[in-house]
Amino acid sequence: QVQLVESGGGLVQAGGSLRLSCAASGSIFNIIFMGWYRQAPGKQRELVAGLTKSGTSNYADSVKGRFTIFRDNTKNMPYLQMNSLKPEDTAVYYCHVKRGSDGLGYWGQGTQVTVSS
């Protein structure tokens, strides 16, 4: 069973930056979608940024212009560059990839991002 592991979270002051990485314990073939989600306490998990196999990206309105999702072409895993962080970005961030052959999705265990004011 392939597992995803996120890294790069931590505590940062408002206005700072973090880069999240996602690694897989094995190979996942035919990834058609990769994305980053987040869940703040008491809130539902939401899509922060997504990237399709064709290279189309989409972002939550709250992070447009500040966050960038990109792919590690060697490992075919997503990164999330987060700039100009705000306290409201505080959440657990999850990596997610979806396989095209059967639609199976994989999730990481999450990494905590805390932005202090």
Image: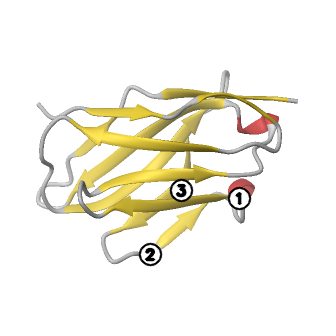
> Percent position (x, y) of residue 39?
58, 32
Q: Quadrant of residue 23?
A: top left
Q: What distance separates the C-alpha of mark 1 from that of mark 2?
A: 17 Å
Label 1 sits on residue: 66
Q: Nearer the viewer, residue 18 or 86?
A: 18
- Assess disc 1: are there few (<14), some (14-19) or many (≥20) residues with their C-alpha within 10 Å of its C-alpha: some
Label 2 sits on residue: 56
Q: In which quarter of the image is residue 109?
A: top left
Image: 83 above or below 93: below
> Percent position (x, y) of residue 37?
51, 43
Residue shown at 68% from the left, 45% from the top = 17
Amino acid identity at mark 2: Thr
State the SS at label 2: loop
Q: Earlier in the sequence, mark 1 or mark 3?
A: 3
Q: Earlier in the sequence, mark 2 or mark 3?
A: 3
Label 3 sits on residue: 49
Residue shown at 18% from the left, 61% from the top = 100
State the SS at label 1: loop
Q: Earlier in the sequence, mark 1 or mark 2?
A: 2
Image: 47 above or below 74: above
Classify residue 31 as left or right of residue 21. left
- Assess disc 3: are there few (<14), some (14-19) or many (≥20) residues with their C-alpha within 10 Å of its C-alpha: many
State the SS at label 3: strand
Residue shown at 45% from the left, 62% from the top = 70
Amino acid identity at mark 1: Arg
Quadrant in which the N terminus is drawn: top left
Image: 62 above or below 110: below
Image: 64 above or below 97: below
